[in-house]
Image: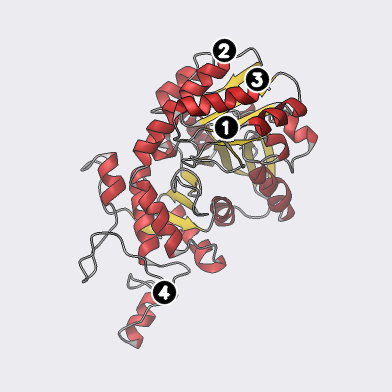
Amino acid sequence: MSENTMSDNEFNFDTLAIRTGHQRTPESEHGEPIFPTSSFVFNSAAEAAARFSGEQPGNIYARFTNPTVRIFEQRLAVLEGGESCVATASGMAAIMAVCLAVLKSGDHIVSSRSIFGTTTILFDRYMGKFGVDTTFVDLTDLTVWEQAIQKNTKLLFLETPSNPLTEVADIAALAELAHAHDCLLVVDNCFCTPALQQPLKWGADIIIHSATKYLDGQGRIVGGAVVGNKETVGTDVLGVLRTTGPTMSPFNAWIALKGLETLSLRMKAHSSNASQLAHMLDQHASIEKVFFSGLSSHPQYELAKRQQKDSGGIVSFRVKGGKEEAWKLIDQTRILSITANLGDTKTTITHPASTTHGRLTDEQKASAGITDNLIRIAVGLEDIEDIMTDVSRGLES
């Protein structure tokens, strides 16, 4: 775990994304080093005792202290405007670490139903197993959020934009609601990243990241992170990581922190390509509906313009027909990768009902808007004309 060391008032985003966190070693290296070590040596027994007790800062054991991981944590914390960051082995590990840190048996979660399918299963099946109940609500309806809050509610959880329908939540309004009921607001910022959206500045308490996605940006690693304040994240979430060990490896941290250096450039390019594809799909006779917050027809178009710097790279749409038509379109593409991952330089295409949300019940899918004719494209950085031609090939089929 690390706390940020560069002020976001002193430097701008792109400078912070490149320079934050690296303290050169005596070797005077220009690039950030990887420290592939499981343990660290102390100068004396007294120093070892002081490190383990927390009286003296410094490296102890790579399960929860590693210099390379620390650079990534410091860099992401400052980009999000947070005090502390804890890197984890995956995005799901980040969500689980938050749950273990702030919840106990008998507590209650209010969550958007428009979230990653595995997150739904985590809350419903596994947290429920330990006596933590979850109520799932419509992401954009503040009234149902308020009605769902109980005396034992401790946490409000959401993704914005949502997966895969790109619904946009009013973070400031939900933060006000959460704090009025003494709850924490947790926002998964995977789709936008801090390059396009900074939920802490809108009142959120904790940010979740899957570093697997846009933070890496090239589909090379699996990782996650939690960003927030010194107490909840820097002490409580860190304590979970130290004890249970869902740790990000030094190599994966190095890959992710190098990804942060180009994050702003990539998110602008992803957004531009996605916008062009969404507008093309919106005019196509074979499309029933397009989901993209950059379209003026999107229900939260104005909110997205106010809350986000751009729309991001996710475009979802319903084809006319059902699963057969959706699968046929997917199978006819030639350059798009048929995979459920996203955030890559390579454009990916998937059928959410049978992949990312495939483990949900039919009722859960229906309530989340996951229909058999829904397709999600994570628009990459290939030439947009080639992307549109490839999708058109599928549509014409």
Q: Earlier in the sequence, mark 4 or mark 2?
A: 4
Q: Earlier in the sequence, mark 4 or mark 1?
A: 4
Q: Which residue is mark 2?
A: 283
The C terminus sits in image quarter = top right
Local secondary structure at mark 3: helix
Mark-to-mark CA distance, 2 and 3: 14 Å
Query: Given the image, on which type of amino acid does mark 2 rest?
Result: Gln
**Other residues around mark 2 within 10 Å, as few (<14) / some (14–19) / many (≥20):** few
Which of pointers 4 and 3 indicates the residue nearer the eye? 3
Spatial CA span between label 1 and label 3: 17 Å
Is residue 276 placed above or below 239 in the rendered structure? above
Mark 2 or mark 3: name the one nearer the start of the chain: 2
Ranked by sequence position, the earlier of labels 1 and 3 is 1
Q: Which residue is mark 1?
A: 377
Q: Residue at x 67, y 49 (%)?
A: 122
Question: x, y percentage for residue 265?
Answer: 34, 37
